[in-house]
Image: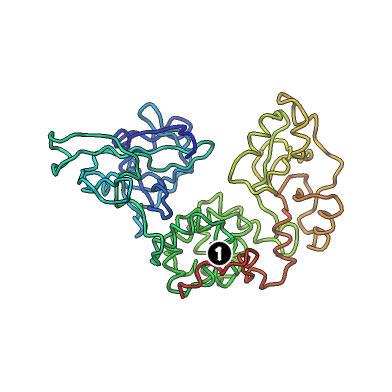
Amino acid sequence: MAAVTHRVFVSHLSGVPVFDPNGDQVGRVRDLVAMLRVGGRPPRILGLVVEVISRRRIFLPMTRVTGVESGQVITTGVVNMRRFEQRPTERLVLGEFLDRRVRLVDGNDQEGEEVTVLDVAIQQLPARRDWEIDKYFVRKGRGGALRRKGETLTVEWSAVSGFSLDEHGQGAENLVATFERLRPTDVANALHHLSPKRRAEVAAALDDDRLADVLEELPEDDQVEIIGKLAEERAADVLEAMDPDDAADLLSELPEEDKERLLELMRPDDAADVRRLLSYEERTAGGLMTTEPIVLRPDATVADALARVRQQDLSPALAAQVYVCRSPDETPTGKYLGTVHFQRLLRDPPFTLVSSIVDSDLVPLPPDTPLPLVTSYLAAYNMVSAPVVDESGSLLGAVTVDDVLDHLLPDDWRETDLTDLHGEEGIGRGGR
């Protein structure tokens, strides 16, 4: 296992305040949400249950937690206020793990002495925002958590039974746990080959961010089917988690009244991005672009640019270059000044201003540029991403090569089972 970067016992998190980056209190931690896994892997912490000022309990994903220290939790500031609803594949750590009677496991996987779980330690994995259960603090004997008798000890998570799933189980919980190890494309392929009933069960069990990634890789018919079976509020949350261009493509396949209802339920900023994309013809630069490229102001440094490029949520195509614009730096931006490619960032000192190394010679794409010209542009200049700029000189977004390929390939290209490249049967076929 990789070296631990941070560990905390969950009893120390109960009731601690949660703050946004500005120091304003969002609420207090009431529980942690975990998912059991297969393959000898420790349970993963999905997020926190936070009680906000109105006493509503909401879900805060661990991907939006930037710090757990000194009796407080710091978030990115992006909080979804939808009421928390526990899914069948989720476990509450404080509510379901503590005081639980389990057995220690010896080296031969034989169940041994019965113990009571008093506390759980979670660790953050190096260089990532993922957290998982690391250790259990247990008491031997048959007493409950308040009983003082019995030896107490801290053991590895694997030394306690009952916190992992059967490797060969076929329920939705096992499928979700198995899918965790796969890329979104492979999960999408597996979902496509499930029955509609099982597909809906698995989609309902996936967290919003994971489901958003998977939906982006599914054929349009499957996307429409899945989004139509979700509760409307959750469907809006998943659309918010999708890339705006993919969300726009999905919404364009829905009846007008359904599309408008979901747009009204989305956060105003997210809905505005999607509405803007829906205003362009589908097979143009404006219809293909994403509205969330890396945008930097002229006074940003190479170090600032590299920090943005390193964000793990970025696709390789978006991370290949940054766009330098005057304020505001949210699309549509102020005046577009040019592009700085990733390779150039690696060649200059960290303190160099991006404005001094910007490539301003390449003419950007107007939003009404048709798909064949977009393709020729990327091929002619050996680029994986290109800026889209309006008549006023504002950057609207960027077209990436993956979105271009999506529209150039045959309509049924997502039906291809890529696991055949390895001579294996596609995962999920047995779930019909």
Q: Amino acid at mark 1?
A: Ala
Q: Nearer the viewer, residue 399 or 24?
A: 399
Q: Is residue 237 visible?
A: yes
Q: Nearer the viewer, residue 196 or 64?
A: 196
Image location (x, y in percent) of residue 30: 30, 42
Classify residue 335 as left or right of residue 311: right
Residue at the farthest front position: 108
Q: Position of residue 248 (x, y in %)?
A: 61, 61
User: Is 97 in front, or is 411?
Assistant: 97
* Residue indicated by mark 1: 188
Which residue is found at the position 72% from the left and 50% from the top?
Answer: 398
Residue 236 image point, x, y percent: 49, 58
Q: Quadrant of residue 139?
A: top left
Residue 388 appears in the figure: no
Q: Quadrant of residue 349 in the image?
A: top right
Which residue lies at the image location 33% right of the left edge and 45% below the top edge?
107
Q: Residues within 10 Å of mark 1 (few under 14, many from 20)?
A: many
Q: Is residue 61 left or right of residue 28?
A: right
298 relative position to 144: left or right? right
Tag 1's secondary structure?
helix
In the rendered image of this protein, does residue 17 appear above or below residue 57? above
User: In the picture, residue 75 is in which quadrant?
Assistant: top left
Q: Is residue 312 above or below residue 70?
A: below
Residue 45, how many percent across, how many down?
40, 45
Count the marks: how many? 1
Q: How is the image coloured?
A: rainbow
Q: Is residue 300 above or below residue 139?
A: above
